[in-house]
């Protein structure tokens, strides 16, 4: 993998230097960048010599001077140029191992790359870090990182990750803290495995690591119909989800009384499973793990607002969602011309009920035979980031052709949802 440029920004330094999409940056002042982190530090110098390889294979040296804080003004095909660091673990709940066969190759990549953790909030286990990786984290002070803890019991963690390296979590966190690195943590919670007393122990151990530990999120394990692992995983139901909520609320009350912040958060699915009201918006502080499904539902409701929605009466609207979030939408909108369609996930299995894992084919099937409608709203989280394509490679363009002349719009948040319903978009 190379530092291949995918986009040049107008009026940028790169445009001035006549660098174009498809060009590769081979070296900066004689050094080959490993990733965009390296590239940013190398380009911070005021005198730069670039070794460029053009798409026709011709190489060129471009020397120039720039301001210290002046950026190149280019995007790259990948954030890492030396290949994504792969995960060698075999976690008992690895979602990649539960992906359907013959799906796009990128969905089958098990990454455990500290750079993607720093840049995009991907969770890492630390078990695949080398001494060189730790050295770079310290050198560039890559903070905060996002770390999958799962359990602070060394033996149990090794069992969950299926690697003896899992036992090293305490020492690895110590090393990060000595370097001044902060981190967010998560636990993928499995019934009768790392819950109960084990969860209490994990919470207590992470709390001791404040202020370096910035947050702890607890999310329920998810299982698709494609899982073939013989290790028994039990998922949470209404009763067991309620027990987890009650257990965690005791900790949350104590933590908030001490610090004024929650620190410890539960995934939305626990509340939806237990049919229990979500905590208020202030409970989530500044939503430090919203991309991990922590407070996403509450944030959507808060953005939608408490005032009565004035739905455009001239529109017939279908709203697509996962089966869990559909219950929330039905409480927000009650109008004869709006139909909430919670879609069963036949692709991954009915136990997978989040909107972000809906596929194009399942949505199309749910919409067929539904009569005429003017507008179809789909969750933007079901589309590949930055692209209009679903997990099963069905494109939004294909879906629009099938249901034309109805307009199909992805919905990104509660505020946008309200505006669309009221005819403002």
Image (cartoon, rainbow, N blue to C red):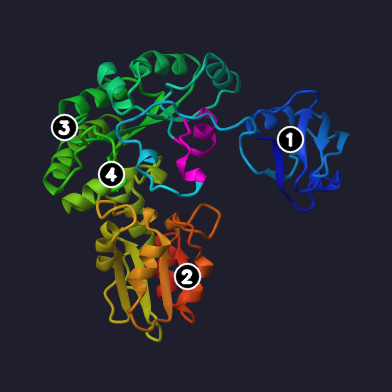
Query: Nearer the viewer's eye, disc 3 or disc 1?
Result: 3
Q: Earlier in the sequence, mark 4 or mark 1?
A: 1
Q: Secondary structure at mark 1?
A: loop
Residue 61's disc number: none
120 inside magenta stretch: yes
**Can see residue 191?**
yes
The residue labelled by disc 2 is 399
Between discs 3 and 2, the one toward the N terminus: 3
* Residue 424 visible here: no
How crowded pointer 2 is (Cα within 10 Å; few <14, some 14-19, many 20+) is rated as some
- State the separation of the CA atoms marked 1 and 2: 45 Å
Range of the magenta residues? 105-122
- Reading the image, the residue beneath label 4 is 223
Residue 69, numbered label: 1
Whichever of callouts 1 and 2 sits on the residue coming sooner in the sequence is 1
Mark 3 vs mark 4: in front: 4
What label does residue 192 carry, if any? 3
């Amino acid at each position: 993998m190379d530092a291949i440029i995918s986009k040049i920004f107008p009026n940028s330094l790169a445009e001035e230097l006549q660098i174009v999409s498809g060009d590769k940056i081979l070296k900066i002042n004689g050094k080959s960048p490993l990733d965009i982190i390296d590239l940013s530090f190398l380009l911070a110098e005021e005198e730069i010599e670039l070794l460029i390889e053009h798409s026709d294979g011709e190489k060129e040296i471009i020397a120039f001077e720039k301001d210290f804080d002046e950026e190149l003004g280019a995007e790259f095909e990948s954030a890492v140029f030396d290949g994504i660091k792969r995960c060698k673990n075999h976690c008992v709940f690895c979602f990649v191992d539960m992906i359907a066969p013959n799906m796009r190759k990128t969905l089958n990549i098990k990454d455990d790359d500290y750079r993607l953790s720093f840049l995009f909030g991907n969770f890492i286990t630390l078990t695949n870090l080398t001494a060189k990786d730790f050295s770079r984290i310290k050198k560039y002070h890559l903070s905060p990182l996002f770390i999958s803890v799962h359990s602070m019991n060394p033996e149990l963690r090794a069992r969950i990750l299926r690697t003896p390296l899992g036992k090293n979590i305490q020492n690895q966190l110590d090393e990060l803290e000595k370097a001044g690195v902060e981190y967010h943590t998560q636990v993928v919670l499995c019934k009768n495995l790392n819950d109960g007393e084990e969860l209490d122990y994990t919470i207590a151990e992470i709390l001791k690591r404040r202020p370096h530990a910035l947050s702890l999120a607890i999310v329920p394990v998810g299982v698709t119909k494609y899982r073939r692992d013989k290790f028994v995983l039990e998922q949470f139901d209404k009763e067991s989800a309620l027990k987890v909520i009650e257990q965690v609320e005791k900790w949350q009350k104590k933590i908030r009384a001490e610090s004024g912040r929650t620190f410890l958060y539960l995934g939305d699915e626990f509340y939806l499973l237990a049919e229990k009201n979500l905590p208020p918006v202030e409970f989530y502080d500044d939503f430090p793990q919203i991309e991990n499904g922590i407070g996403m539902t509450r944030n959507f409701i808060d953005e939608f607002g408490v005032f009565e929605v004035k739905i455009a009466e001239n529109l017939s609207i279908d709203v697509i969602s996962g089966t869990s979030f559909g219950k929330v939408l039905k409480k927000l909108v009650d109008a004869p011309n709006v139909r909430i369609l919670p879609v069963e996930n036949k692709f991954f299995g009915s136990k997978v009920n989040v909107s972000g894992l809906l596929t194009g084919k399942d949505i199309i099937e749910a919409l067929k035979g539904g009569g005429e409608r003017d507008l179809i709203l789909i969750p933007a989280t079901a589309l590949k980031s930055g692209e209009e394509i679903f997990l099963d490679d069905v494109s939004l363009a294909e879906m629009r052709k099938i249901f034309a002349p109805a307009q199909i719009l992805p919905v990104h948040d509660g505020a946008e949802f309200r505006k669309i319903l009221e005819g403002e978009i």
